[in-house]
Amino acid sequence: MLVLVDDPALLHSIRRVAAAADRALNEVDVADARHVWGSAPIVVLDARAAAACRNRLPRRRRVVLLCDGPPGIDEWRIATAVGAEHVLAVPEDESALVAVLGEQPQRPEADGTVVAVVGGCGGAGASTLAAATALAAASRQRPTLLLDTDSWGSGLDVLLGIEDVPGLRWSGLSIEGGRISSGALRDALPACGEWLRVLACSRTGHGAGPTAAAVRAVTDAGRHAGDLVVCDVSRFPGPATETVLELADLVVLVVPATVRACIAAGKVSQWITERNPNQGLVVRGPAPGGLRGADAAEVLDLPLIASMRAERALTGMLEHGGLRPGRRSPLGAAAEAVLDTVGSRPRSREWAA
């Protein structure tokens, strides 16, 4: 279980109770908790850690707030903010804590996945791969949510050719209380076929992109609904970008097959690793210097998901009706490889290279 506790007396109680409940401990600092927050079967924290986590990490099940003595109004407030299911005092409630830790967690019926797609350099094709991955998932009849988090782009609705389809964009989304109904969200978004919904940025004006709080709320809603959430992410730092990276189960880095692109991608990959170690690489042709995908993967020290040839018909496709790659096209095959990677890796987010 994940333990975020500084107080020595509370920590001593936790260790004693964990031994009685035969549970292993993973004691970490709040700053290092984001990579194991979603995978831990249960989280035990104190009020200080809860205050730090409530705005940095998504709400989750099986959270216990531990207090040194009877909880007061401040402890109950922070427990509500972080979504704690139990508020227990030690040593008075140690027997109750043993019982809570001894419970076997039930896997939720709906357990979605979040994939972030980032370009290693300008023009890498991250938006195109993100859209292709969402289309491939929808073709497998999996409920899919495609999020456009780069407000400087042309918009994923334009890329898909659904810019005239009515529905909600980021600029019209209002988040109250940090949460949103997954059903209401899906009904409000433009559809691209039966299985895919798209949340795009507005095409008018700067600042029409999502806030970090909105990104977190929408991503959580999709995950809890059991959707595949595919996010097109800017390679430039920002609150919304960093939120997506922290929430993602897998970050796909897209890199053109050139030396200059790999050098730029190395900087981006290092920045991503500080927020999420679970990265995979897609290398996109053409390769004018003969650089292979395996070479790029070795240089960047990342697992290679796919190495794809250039999609020759892409420009014409985007100008006439929107992106619709075939499954056997280079882009379609790369998208299928991303989905296969997501399906084969552990749910515990331990796929990092």
Image (cartoon, rainbow, N blue to C red):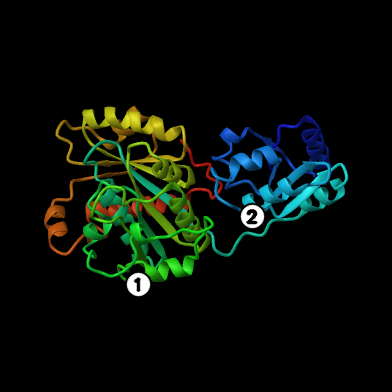
Q: Earlier in the sequence, mark 1 or mark 2?
A: 2
Above/below status of 144 relative to 315: below
Across and down, in percent, residue 129 comes to: 29, 50
Name which residue type carries label 2.
Arg
Name which residue type carries label 1.
Glu
Label 1, on which residue?
194
Label 2, on which residue?
61
Residue 157 visible somewhere in the drawing: yes
Depth check: 75 or 87 in front? 75
Q: How many marks?
A: 2
In the rendered image, the residue lying farthest to the front is 73
Across and down, in percent, residue 334 comes to: 30, 50
Tell me what residue is drawn at x 16 percent, y 54 percent. 314
Few, some or many C-alpha atoms within 10 Å of disc 1 (few <14, some 14-19, many ≥20)? few
Do the residues bearing badges 1 and 2 touch, measured as CB atoms within 8 Å? Answer: no
Q: CA distance from mark 1 to mark 2?
A: 30 Å
270 horizontally vs 314: left or right: right
- Disc 2 is placed on an element classified as loop
Across and down, in percent, residue 64 comes to: 72, 48
Q: Would you identify the image quadrant in which residue 10 lies?
A: top right
16 horizontally vs 139: left or right: right
- Disc 1 is placed on an element classified as loop
